[in-house]
Amino acid sequence: MANRVKCLIIGSGPAGYTAAIYASRANLQPVLIEGPQLGGQLTTTTEVENFPGYPDGVEPFQMMDDMKRQAERFGTQFVSGVVTKVDFSVSPKKVWVEDTKEYEADAVIIATGASAKYLGIESERTYKGRGVSACATCDGFFYRKKTVAVVGGGDTACEEANYLAGLCEKVYMIVRKPYLRASEIMQQRVLNNPKIEVLFEHNTLQLTGEGKVQGADLVYRKGEPDEAMKHIDIDGFFLAIGHHPNTELFKDYIACDAEGYIITDGASTQCFKCENAQMGKCENEKIPGVFAAGDCADPHYRQAIVAAGSGAKAAIEADKYIKSLQ
Ligand code: NDP
């Protein structure tokens, strides 16, 4: 027997929790499915210093717990578990949690976020939160006057390297190809910055250090006759090799861009219908009652405050939609 709800929110990052605060205050009695990473991507960082309202900074788990309690206060119900299946072709929309619990909801807010890509080397996990980061804007401040490395050669890597060069003593860029993939202007900024040293055709083998990152072992032109090993002394290791939005589950129903980010209706958070995403046959027709907020629909900003703002928008739109059904 399905649980019938007015508003179902998928995801427990800043977008999901903010949507829950707004939806519960609008008396929608929302149910929030927390997903695999309680608190979202933010909890992989060390301290949050750029979220307004915390003048002394805040530990990320604390901030997410604050948001959760705020949503709870107004009646949000939390369900721990992972959404395994959805059916948005029907009204009310259907959502399954771990294939066992079934929900029927008038409105669904997707706030499943995005995940940074990692290289997949063992030491990345060992030093996560102790020198390994995937967000220069979040964590760069902790490396003031220190030496860091940024992995990647795209626009994100160049942007992060430039940002870090404003704070750090020295920035290495570890680029696997003999060239940067970033836009010309970003390349020029990197190449003209005296604090940035680009190590072309290098790959990271492992990170080293006593309890925190202190260095990286690299290989130059692996497999080529001139292959060579290189060690760099660093305090921080920043991944900038792309993100992937957590939207796989929804692709048969809603339109996503080539990278998988959910396409919304301009300033609105409303999603578009996609009858058969695999065949690229997406319709320019909105899907009533399905909204997306936060990083799963935002390839550009990827900031907690932006995600929170879009969560508020999604809840306001869900409220309007639900009222229109009455
Ligand atoms: P991209 O996919 O453009 O670049 C990823 C980079 O990481 C590439 O240099 C790639 O190398 C490298 N890489 C990927 N996997 C590995 C790996 N396993 N080991 C080492 N290196 C790896 O991602 P971005 O996040 O930079 O950009 C995503 C999109 O967002 C792009 O369209 C970009 O233009 C846009 N963007 C625009 C900005 C702006 O305009 N201000 C700012 C940031 C992003 P390789 O080249 O060899 O594949």
Image (cartoon, grey):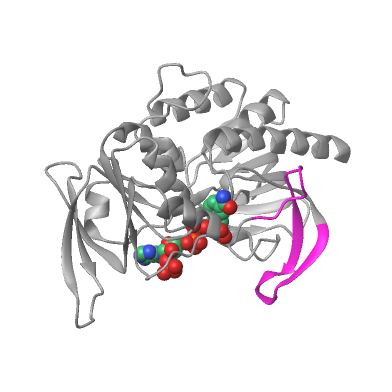
Locate residue 316: give its quadrant. top right
**Residue found 82% across the figure and 62% down from its top:** 284
What are the residue bounds of the magenta stretch?
262-285
Locate residue 257: give its quadrant. bottom right
Left/right placement of residue 20 relative to residue 164 reads: right
The picture places residue 313, in percent across and down from the top left corner, at: 71, 35
Q: State the residue lying farthest toward the left.
A: 210
When the figure is inspected, residue 303 is found, relative to residue 2, above or below; the finding is above
Q: State the residue lying farthest toward the bottom.
A: 225
Left/right placement of residue 35 relative to residue 111 reads: left
**Residue found 44% across the figure and 64% down from its top:** 180
Q: Nearer the viewer, residue 77 or 321?
A: 321
Q: Nearer the viewer, residue 73 or 196?
A: 196
**Residue found 70% across the figure and 38% down from its top:** 314
Q: Nearer the viewer, residue 160 or 7?
A: 160
Whether residue 102 is visible, yes or no, is no
When the figure is inspected, residue 110 is found, relative to residue 117, above or below; the finding is above
Q: Nearer the viewer, residue 43 or 192?
A: 192
From the image, which quarter does the C terminus lie in? top right
Q: Is residue 28 magenta?
A: no
**Badge count:** 0
The picture places residue 192, in percent across and down from the top left corner, at: 42, 51
The picture places residue 185, in percent across and down from the top left corner, at: 54, 55
The picture places residue 198, in percent across and down from the top left corner, at: 33, 58
Q: Is residue 279 magenta?
A: yes
Whether residue 121 is visible, yes or no, is yes
